[in-house]
Image (cartoon, rainbow, N blue to C red):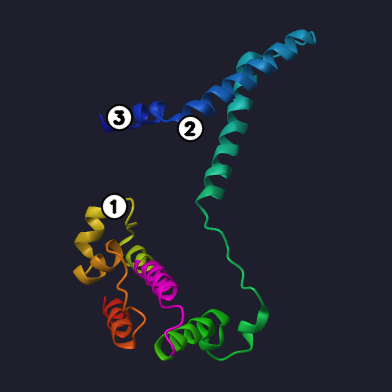
Amino acid sequence: MSRLSGIRDLGRSRAWRRRAASTVAVWLGLVVLAALLGQRASVAQLAAVVLAVAMLLWYLMDHAASNALTHWPVSDLYRFHAHRGQDFRVTNLATRLRAANERGEGRESLVVDLHALLGTVIRERLHAKHGLVVEEEPKWSRGVMPPELWAFLTQPPDPDLYRPDRLRAVVERIERW
């Protein structure tokens, strides 16, 4: 029974209907082309060849779509440095945190950027530990996440997030999870 429901699900899938329709259209086009050229093509053999090529293409397309994009580093400097602190993004963030704490410069934009950055870390950790995506499975995600991190993701950012004690508390909670 479950096997039939899987076939029904494939029949309802727009992508598979499009694939089947395009395969039939290519097959009919080749049959008509062969008839117009005066060739006596075997319709069944032609269908088998078209179906085999289509299945190979579908496999390659599905396999290529499942692979993640590779993100290359901006430069080769990462090879020559001993630690991550020399990454320009980390250095930029440290400079902005220092300016916000000492002179009050750019606090609002820094809070928004910190919230987005830490939210990304939480989402990546959720996906790595449990294979969940918050937007796709919010109930399951909420159930496996600590309440503080769930509140951090779903509520607006704390305006004092740039302060070391607040930032330390969030980062330590992420690390303990």
**Which numbered disc, 1 or 3, marks the residue that appears first in the sequence?**
3
* Residue at x 61%, y 19% (from the top left corner): 25
Label drawn at residue 21: none
The image position of residue 128, as x and y in percent, is: 36, 66
Q: Nearer the viewer, residue 141 or 44?
A: 141
Picture layout, residue 31 above or below residue 167: above
- Looking at the rendered structure, the kind of residue marked 3 is Ser
Label 1 vs label 2, nearer the camera: 1
Q: CA distance from mark 1 to mark 2?
A: 23 Å
Main SS, magenta residues: helix
- Looking at the rendered structure, the kind of residue marked 1 is Glu
Q: CA distance from mark 1 to mark 3?
A: 23 Å
**Which numbered disc, 1 or 2, marks the residue that appears first in the sequence?**
2
Q: Nearer the viewer, residue 67 or 105?
A: 105
**Which numbered disc, 3 or 2, marks the residue that appears first in the sequence?**
3
Residue occupying the far right of the picture? 37
* Residue at x 30%, y 76% (from the top left corner): 174
Label drawn at residue 5: 3
**Quarter residue 158 falls in:** bottom left
Label drawn at residue 137: 1
Residue 112 among magenta residues:
yes
Q: Mark 2: which secondary structure?
A: helix
Picture layout, residue 28 above or below residue 82: above
Q: CA distance from mark 3 to mark 2?
A: 17 Å
Label drawn at residue 15: 2
- Looking at the rendered structure, the kind of residue marked 2 is Ala
**Quarter residue 56 falls in:** top right
Q: Mark 1: which secondary structure?
A: loop
Question: What residue span does the magenta drawing correspond to?
Answer: 103-122
Label 1 vs label 3, nearer the camera: 1
